[in-house]
Image (tube, coloured by chain):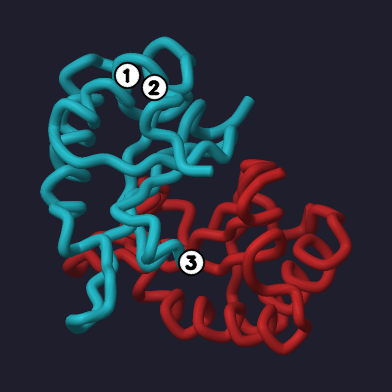
Chain colours: A red, B cyan
Amino acid sequence: MAYFERHVFFCLNERAAPDACCANHRSAELQAYAKDRVKKLGISGRGKVRVNKSGCLDRCDDGPCLVVYPEAVWYTFVDEGDIDEIVESHLVGGQVVERLRLP
Amino acid sequence: MAYFERHVFFCLNERAAPDACCANHRSAELQAYAKDRVKKLGISGRGKVRVNKSGCLDRCDDGPCLVVYPEAVWYTFVDEGDIDEIVESHLVGGQVVERLRLP
């Protein structure tokens, strides 16, 4: 059994303008929001879900982005509503949110 | 096909003494070393290997630690020799290094 059932990494990398970077798209704020949502839903911790900060995930032009392992599903997102959908559909229900999925 | 064949996350988290933290065990320096080794071996990038910095992986007492996805294999390490073994055996050859594996 995996240490975490699902492990989520948000890119929080900052780059100097005019380069694209996830930090310019509220990634830090939305990572904290996702972590809090997961905790409040009681699905955080060992054997369950971990929402992590990460350095550059090397998809700057696709960002803001996050990745969910072990499925290796990548998402982009705009706001809290998108995060809610990823948390409730994917992290709770195991259903990938195709609308927000990165190719 | 996954965006990265193998995605490695090193915990670089710092905590104030006397709390255990990965940053006290050269994790930042060894993450940079691993990234450089992977690059020099020509196995870095899309469809291959990515070596990432990460925030706290929540295994402070087991640290320093890293995790390799999508396999969800966790390792501890002490020095460059351990990193070489993880890179050459697991990241290049697909063979888990049981000696360094965390339970």
Look at the picture and state if B16 lies above or below A44: below
Q: For the residues carrying marks 3 and 1, which lies nearer the camera in this image?
A: 3
Query: Which residue is labeled 3 in the image?
Result: A52
Q: Which residue is mark 1?
A: B43
Camera-nearest residue between A62 and B14: B14
Identity of the residue drawn at 56% across and 68% down: A51
Q: Amino acid at mark 3?
A: Asn
- Nearer to us in this view, B12 or A21: B12
Mark 1 or mark 2: whose residue is earlier in sequence = 1
Q: Are marks 3 and 1 in contact (CB under 8 Å)?
A: no
Where does the image place residue A58, in percent across and percent down from the top left?
A: 36, 46
Question: Which of these two is toward me, B4 or A98?
Answer: B4
Asked if the residue under mark 2 is in contact with the one under mark 1, i.e. CB atoms within 8 Å, the reply is yes
Mark 2 closeness class: few <14, some 14–19, many ≥20 residues within 10 Å? many
What chain does mark 3 sit on? A
How dense is the environment of label 1, judged by Cα within 10 Å: few (below 14), some, or many (20 and up)? some
Q: Which residue is mark 2?
A: B91
Same subunit, tags 3 and 1: no
